[in-house]
Amino acid sequence: MIPHKLSSTIPQILNILNDGRIHTGIDIGNDLGISRTAVWKVIKRLQKYNIDIQSQHKGYYLKEPLILLDQRKIEPFLADKRISLEIFETLESTSHYLKSIMPLENQTVCLSEYQSMGRGRLGRRWLSPFGHNIYCSLSSIFKKDIVEMSGLSLVVAVLTANALESFNPRLKVGLKWPNDLYMNNQKLGGILIELMGEAYGNCQAIIGIGLNVNMKDIKLAGLDQPWISLEHITQEKLDRNFIVGYILRTIFEGLDVFQHKGLEAFLPEWEKYDLLRNQKVSLNTGAGKVFGIARGVDSQGLLLVEDSTGSIQKFSYGDASLFKD
Ligand code: BTN
């Protein structure tokens, strides 16, 4: 699939339709200085993404307002002007895109309104409907050896939870090791970290963040676990630009701390968010299931599980869930 940058015409047309009235193609075209056919082509594209724009004989009508990602709203959150930001209409996957344009010298952020092949942890798919959620990847280089990077996924999860709470104190997130974001026992988002060793002991990380935002009334085939979106909590549509802004600002500041102080600086906060701590868990390690009581994480972010004999085992990998007997 060819990466498609988000053109300004799409948000402009949506801005007109967001008033909930019926607009003719000619009126929209006149407002924007484009032809009626150009308007029609954009409407068709949006309809292909399942955006509910009705074409009536009187004109076009959009049922639910839709605010798209906007560079101008996000950039003020990026204090470091060397961070470059790219926004796409559609991509296979934001993380895949960043990898395809490596080597990246500066920190780069990539957002997309839609991912045709969004990827989750452990080889899963990440369903990515157009315009409702956040699909964000960022790249960063660390002056660390790859073995010191094991805590990064926990750090990014803590920082994302912090960002959401400072955006709106009602957004109380819990974290499931290593980096799932939960609210009310349902999955809100997830993080996918990919690490590449570089020369001179440096390490490049591609950090992918998927977050359900305005996804209250959507039916998605293929979603196999209970999920929740921020809209379920706030009961209103949110402007994703500000949420992305809070997340990026918090993450870039936090990555500096991680660079200098490592995971240790974040462990007290991890403990605060940790949903598994002192709970009965089952951990699918790929090589079989392990049952026990989760006892937090060690200094490298490995999950500690106490088995029935009272001894503690450490895990670097796996899919954990609460175990009810
Ligand atoms: C998980 O399995 O919980 C991790 C999900 C990570 C999804 C994000 S969306 C942005 C980035 N691009 C991808 O293809 N995946 C990550």
Image (cartoon, rainbow, N blue to C red):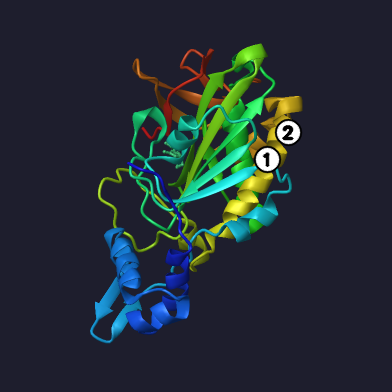
Residue 124 x, y percent position in the rendering: 34, 34
Badge 1 is on which residue? 252
Residue nearer the viewer, 102 or 80: 102
Classify residue 6 by image quadrant. Answer: bottom left
Q: The disc labelled 1 sits on which kind of residue?
A: Phe
Please tell me how many numbered marks the rendered image carries: 2
Q: The disc labelled 2 sits on which kind of residue?
A: Asp
Relative to residue 104, is residue 181 depicted above or below?
below
User: Which quadrant does ligand 1 occupy?
Assistant: top left
Residue nearer the viewer, 39 or 120: 39
Position of the C terminus by quadrant: top left
Residue 153 x, y percent position in the rendering: 56, 30
Residue 223 x, y percent position in the rendering: 30, 46
Relative to residue 215, is residue 148 depicted above or below?
above
Q: Secondary structure at mark 1?
A: helix
Q: Kindly identify the residue that appears in the image at 25 percent across and 50 percent down.
A: 221
In contact (CB < 8 Å): disc 1 and disc 2? yes
- Kindly report the distance in space between the C-alpha atoms of the residues bearing marks 1 and 2: 7 Å
Q: Kindly identify the residue that appears in the image at 67 percent across and 19 percent down.
A: 144
Local crowd size for mark 1, using a 10 Å CA cut-off: few (<14), some (14–19), many (≥20): many
Q: Which mark is residue 256?
A: 2
Q: Which mark is residue 6?
A: none
- Does residue 311 appear left or right of residue 167 in this picture? left
Relative to residue 67, is residue 153 depicted above or below?
above
Relative to residue 155, is residue 224 depicted above or below?
below
Q: Secondary structure at mark 2?
A: helix
Residue nearer the viewer, 272 or 64: 64
